[in-house]
Image (cartoon, grey):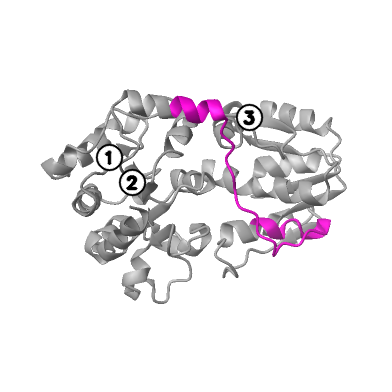
Amino acid sequence: MIGDVLATSILFEALKQKYPNSELHYVINSHTYAVVENNPFIDKFHFFTKDHEQSKRKLWQFANKLRRENYDIVIDVYSKISSNIITLLSKAKIKISIYKGHNTLIYNHRFKHKQKADTNAGLAIENRLKLLQPLGIDSSKVVKPKIYLTDYEKIRAKQFLQSNNIDLSKPLFMIGVLGSGGNKTYPFEYMAEVLDTIISKEPESQILFNYIPNQEKDAKTILEFCEPITQQHIYFDIFGKSLRDFLAITSHCDALIGNEGGAINMAKALKTPTFTIFSPWIKKEAWNMFDDGDKHVSVHLKDFNKQPYINVSHPKVLESKASELYIDFKPSFFKTDLKAFLKRLC
């Protein structure tokens, strides 16, 4: 996933700081390249595709191609079956990954995930940095994910917005109206209420929707749930045609507000303020990276109602109850937090 690839990119900066002459390669899903394009700490990319995922023969060929790179070290962040095969076939003497019962014989350094973060970097960052300990790198030294846009991309995005009657002297908000799935998407009526709150608090605001073409119908439904005055401030048809376009447009926004997911993580990497609405079954402590209560704020049902989480070992066990829990996660719970966030920005 895009958020995972972006979060893992911090390892390259930490490695280059310790070993400036090292050659670092990144194996990623091909569709995630946009968030690490131009990263100065990554020397080479290898793209894992659906073909590799669906064909054992092509996965084997891919693993053998990587074997010929003669790696000294392999760091496997997730320890999936495909990455286990790649690691097993590699010539690396040092193999590092997370602790899983089946991977004992593959990796000579394994780490169990921490359950509580020590910093506001969050568990997603801290657990990744732990993987660098066998290489003499201080895992307590936090590195933030970064996205590297070119000046041309930023200028082109600015021109695009201005040509579509966006006034950059007024507040501009990107809204993550939809999550990656139904169980990570704030109810449509509730999201519309969030948008109404933004316009009531900042009446000169201009709102952009972040959605992909196959989500257009759902995005329009949210638009229709909004008050008429709010609809007048939504520029529904203005969006990036590619992920890099979205990133460049978001870099000009005053904030990204909406569902937790890749878009939120990308905005943080662009240093764009964020207000995140977490799904009730997602562990907030894992992905509320660099929340500071100021420029980066996140809200979770557990912040307001701890009852559903009593005697629950991990929020993921509540995944099947996401719809029911979302209904209880009313916009009124965090309306004051959202208004305070907007006041600090504007």
Mark 1 vs mark 3: give the one in front. Answer: 1
Above or below for 81 versus 310 = above
Q: Is residue 106 visible?
A: no
x and y, in percent, of residue 49 in the image: 60, 29
Read off the residue under disc 1: 206
Start and end of the magenta stretch?
128-157
Give residue 18's mark. none
Q: Tell me where residue 46 sits by quadrant.
A: top right
Q: Secondary structure at mark 1?
A: strand
154 left or right, relative to 5: left
Closest to the observer, 195 or 188: 195
Instruction: Give the residue number, with chain letter if any, for mark 2.
Output: 182
**Closer to us: mark 2 or mark 3?**
2
SS at badge 3: helix
Image position of 297 (left or right of 112): left
- Mark 2 is on which residue type? Gly
Ranked by sequence position, the earlier of labels 1 and 2 is 2
For the question of whether residue 306 can be seen, the reply is yes
Distance from Cα at disc 1 to Cα at disc 3: 43 Å
